[in-house]
Structure formats: C-alpha cells, structure tokens
Amino acid sequence: MTELAKKVARYFPYDNVRPFQDKFVETVFEAIEKGGSALIEGSNGLGKTIATLSACLPKAVEQNLKILYVARTHRQHDRVVEELKAISRKQRISGISIKGRHEMCLNNVVARHALDARAVMEVCEMLKTRDRCPYFRNIEENPDEYSEIQQHITFRPYKASEIQKICRVRGFCTYELVKASLAEVNVIALSYLYVFDPAIRKAFLKNLDAPLHKIILIVDEAHNLPETAIEIASSSLSLFAIKQAELEAKKFGYEEVKDFAKFVRSQIERLMEKIGKEALVSPEVLIELVREKADVGEPLTFFEHLHEIGSSLRRSLLAEGKYPRSFIHGMSEFLLRWVETAEEQSFVNVISKYMSRTGVATAKLEIVSLDPSKITAPVFSSVRSSIVMSGTLQPLEAYTQISKLPENTIKSVVPSPFPKEHILPLVCCGVTTAMEKRTPPMYNKIIKRIQEVSQNTPANIGVFTASFEVLQALRAEKLEKALDKPVFHEHKGMTSKENETLVARFKVHAKHGGAVLLGVQGGRSSEGVDYPGDQMNSVAIVGVPYAEPTPKVRAQIDYFEKRFSGLGREYGYILPAMKKASQVAGRPIRSLEDKGAMIFLDHRFATVYCQHFLPSWIRNSLKILPDKDGVVAWELSRFFRKVC
Ligand code: SF4
C-alpha cells in the first residue's frame, strides 16, 4: 500500500471504491500535500464528497487545520455530515452543518421579519445587547446544561437540524451553540455566504478562531460560484423601498429626508418613462442630480447623514421592542455604495423595469458587479488549500480565469464512472429556438419531438426550455394536448415552496405510469433538485438558454472582453448558457444505478463549439440525429428496452 493509500484508508469508510474515485482522491491528496489548490470536474455518482473528505482529513488532523465544506443547499450540507458519520465509525471525527442565522434562530421577532442574512445578523446583535432574547439569556442562566450540550455537539458529527431540535427542547439559542462549537469541530458544512460574503465572513472567522491560512476550503457545486459572487457584490433599490423611506421620514418628522426620497422617486419614475426594459445609468448622473437639484448640499455628506438617521431609528424601534427595520437606513446604504463604486470599472449602474408581485409596473436602481473574482480571489489566495469541484466546470481554464484561482491550481477532469450503456445523450437536428426561427411551424416540430420522448420513456420526463417565452409559445401551440402523460408546469415568479410542491407531485407519478415536468433551464426545478430512479428517465433540453442581450449582459461581455481579450462573448454570454444546459442534462443521472436519456432539442448543440462546453461524460457519448420524424422514438425505445 502506498503512503497515500494508507493515509486515506484510515478515513475512507466503505469497502468498495467506485470507478475513478481513486483518481479523484489522488488529485485532492496531491493538492493538499502541496498546500495548493485543485479544480476538478467529476460527474455525479463518483462519490466526490467522501473522496474529498477522506483525502483532506489526514492533513487536516495532522496539522490541526479546519475544513470548511461549502455547498448551496442544506441537503448537500447534511450529506457531508452523513459521510462524516460514516467516517466516525472508523476514526473519531467531529463536524457540523450550519444554516443561516435566520434559519437557526428560534426567536419569533427575527423569524417573523427576517429580510436577509445581513439584516438578521444586525437585529440579533441588537436584541442580545439589549437583553431581549430569552434563548440567549438562558445560556447565562443555565451554563452547566449549556456546556454539557456543547460537549456532545463537538464530540461527533451533527446536522444543523439535529442541533436545532436539541436547542428547541432545552430553550437555548441554536446559533450561539453552533457558534461556540465552531472552534472545536474538524469539519463545517455551510453555505457560500459564510465564506464569500466579506461582511459575513468577518464575523464568522472571529467565531471560528482560525485564520484563513489554517483552512482547507472545499467548494462543491462550484459552477454556481461565479454567479453567487456577482450576487454578493451587487445591490438594488426599488421604487417601493424609496416610497417606504418617504413614508417613514414623514412619520418620524424628517421633512428634508421625505423631500429627498420623493425627489429620487420622481427622478426614477421620469427615467422609467424613457427606457425600454432596462438601461445603463452613469453613476455621476444621480450624484450630479442630487448635488444640483435636491437641495441637500454635498451628496456624500447627506447620504452619511441619512445613514445616521436610519441607524438611530432602528435603535429606537428596538428599544420599544419592535422589529428594527428602517427603509431610510436601507436607502442610505445603497446610495453610499453607489458613490463608493462610482469609479470602479467592475461595476455598472442600471435602471430596470419589472412587474411587482401584485402585477404593477415598477422599477429599481441596481449596482451590478461584473467581476466575480473581486469576491472569490481574496478567499482563494488566503486559504491554505482549496478544492473546487462540480460535475459541470469545463472549460477549466475559463473557470480558473473568471474566479481567479491561484496560478498553481491543479486542473483535472475525472472520467465518468457511469457505464456508457446507462446514458443516451442525443442531439436533434432540424429544431432550434434561435430567435429568428421562433415560428409556429418550428414550435410544432419541437412538440413532435417532445411527444416522441414522452411516448418512448417508461416513466417521468422533464422538458426544460431556453426561457419562459419559449415555454409559453410551446404551450400556446398545444404542447400539453400532444402529451400522453399528466403535465406539471413551472411558472414565472413561483415561490420555492410552490415549486417544491409541484416537483413532489410530479415525482409521485414515477411509479404510476409517468408524468411530464415543464420548466425552464436555470429555473427552480432544473438545478439543485435530484430525480433519482424513475423520477426522471429522460430530459429534453429545448434550445440553448442564451440570455436576452440586455444592457447588463452587454456590459458583462464588454467587461470580460477588456479583461480577457477575445473571450468576452464566450465568458459573458456562451458559458452561462451552456452551464444551465449542462446542469439540466445531468438531472436524470444522480447515482451509478440510474439510467437516463438527454435529448438536446436544438441543432446548435451538435456544433463542435457548443460541445466544447458540455461535460465530457455527455460529450463523449453524444449522438447526432438527422432531421427526421421517428428517429428519437426509435433511439429511446431501443435504449429503454435494453436498460430497463
Ligand atoms: S440570540 Fe439566537 S435566538 Fe436570539 S435572536 Fe440571536 S440568533 Fe435568534
């Protein structure tokens, strides 16, 4: 046995190693040994979580390093703890999964009004300072009971939900208990925000009691990271929020603030009249307007003044035992950020129109970040090692550049463990959702192909279109009528709860003859939801989900073009679309036992250029079908006859 195998075997809890899992382990182990980073594409079913943990733990334990495992969903975090529990049957190891403070908090004041992670953090701190949280107070009143629970938590792996259950029964704050345990456990599974949002990270690291250079960072489902980084650095201010600030100022007698909010609102409404759906705004325009017309003196000084008013309002509300929300505070934070980013090339300012939940046309101002690396690079360059992995990362060079991974990052594509005969990726020629070809005859041809997929798939199928417009057009051409199975469809603006219910109802049909789920690529049901077994035997990927070429999208392309000459369009436009398509294509295949067909209904997927962005496990088996009725039906019936 090699040194590597011996060290990893101490932690790897299973008797069998999956195909190519050893290659995955080797790459991770090499990066950790060198104190460097690795960017690894490996498909589902490879057992990436356990492979990575087993390869990182020897060094982490030896050198007292902390492992932070970041992923997007709680289900993924819990999966890490489940693997740690398996490891802990061999080696004593501790670990916890944590949720956001607003999800762990048991205090109704926060639970009722939680807006976003940052707001919850501030409110909780205020409640604690003013001794208004019984769960926090209980810690001081019952220190022995509290430390006994803490000892248990740090002794073996615990899921966030398990810790929460204990705290609810004993009346302690879950968040505080988790916080106090962070420094003691080996592995923490958590959301991207704890590590990549600078404000949240600062507070988190303080509790962790470990500097970044003592951390091994594992980023799972890393294809999401660039988009999440952009969201973290961007912010917006809606007409609704400004109106609320105006009302708040009126209520508390701040005449000058009321007039100012009214002025900003009227300016946005005027701008709204002049634009289409979205337009770029020069940051100076707003600053100059305020300087010249708002009669408030120097803009920056006035925005700071607003911030002070907002903060004092929040303090007073809290003192009265109320939820300390201030729209004046929110507006001032946005305006200060507007000034702060005004001269930075990596931001653009945008005004956009949209429909409110109540169906009213409204608008918002946005500060949009164009550079994910401003958020990711400070982390990657400071941690001891990082393992960045996903099933859809290619081309790896593009990912490395966009996220600014360290130069010596090991890049690897681990072969798929799936038996080739378990998957059937097809591209249909003769169909497309390219803008100029969107005609009723084309939609009818696409419907015919979807019909062939539905009729020749044993149970459930997913149909994910390039956009809601395409989905709408297919439905207008009577897609549902052409299908022989019950249909469930996603709609625009659906809440996550509504979506969960829809998906659950769809999944039930896997055992009752099958159903069809209609959704959009990049939508709620096409990413982050697993459909194992018969829950999705086939998936139809209808069209390439290119974004509408809005000013924001064009600004992104231009920015990347400046940074990576000749690659702006590829990085800012092609890559995000192909990532969405690849994610959808992977839905039917989640475990080694799954068998699934992926039918790309757009001839553009047949081009070498597009294929270059697909994961190799799809690319290597891709079959291009001629533009002929019945070919899809024949391929699918033959495939399912063989594998079922
Ligand atoms: S101390 Fe805990 S329970 Fe109290 S508000 Fe903060 S997070 Fe919630």
Image (spheres, rainbow, N blue to C red):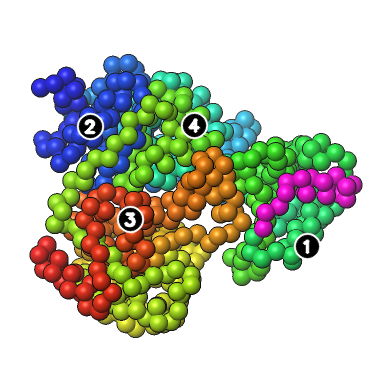
Select label 2 or label 3 by which is in front: 3
Q: Amino acid at mark 2?
A: Val
Classify mark 1: helix, strand or loop.
Answer: helix
Residue at point 42% right, 70% down? 433
On the image, the x and y values in percent for residue 505 come to 32, 67
Q: Residues within 10 Å of mark 3 (few under 14, many from 20)?
A: few
Residue at point 85% right, 52% down? 259
Q: Main secondary structure of the magenta part?
A: helix
Q: Which mark is residue 377?
A: 4
What is the quadrant of the N terminus in the image? top left
Lower sequence index among marks 1 and 3: 1
> Camera-side residue: 570 or 302?
570
Classify mark 4: helix, strand or loop.
Answer: helix
Work out how far the residue at label 1 is from the one at label 4, CA to CA, in angstroms. Answer: 39 Å
| Residue linked to disc 2 | 25
On the image, the x and y values in percent for residue 330 come to 68, 45
Q: Amino acid at mark 3?
A: Val
Kindly give the residue lying farthest to the top in the view shown: 63
> Camera-side residue: 21 or 517?
21
Lower sequence index among marks 4 and 3: 4
Q: Amino acid at mark 4?
A: Ala
Residue at point 22% right, 78% down? 630
Q: Which mark is residue 608?
A: 3
| Residue linked to disc 1 | 270
Range drawn in magenta? 279-295
Q: Which mark is residue 37?
A: none
Q: Residues within 10 Å of mark 2 (few under 14, many from 20)?
A: many
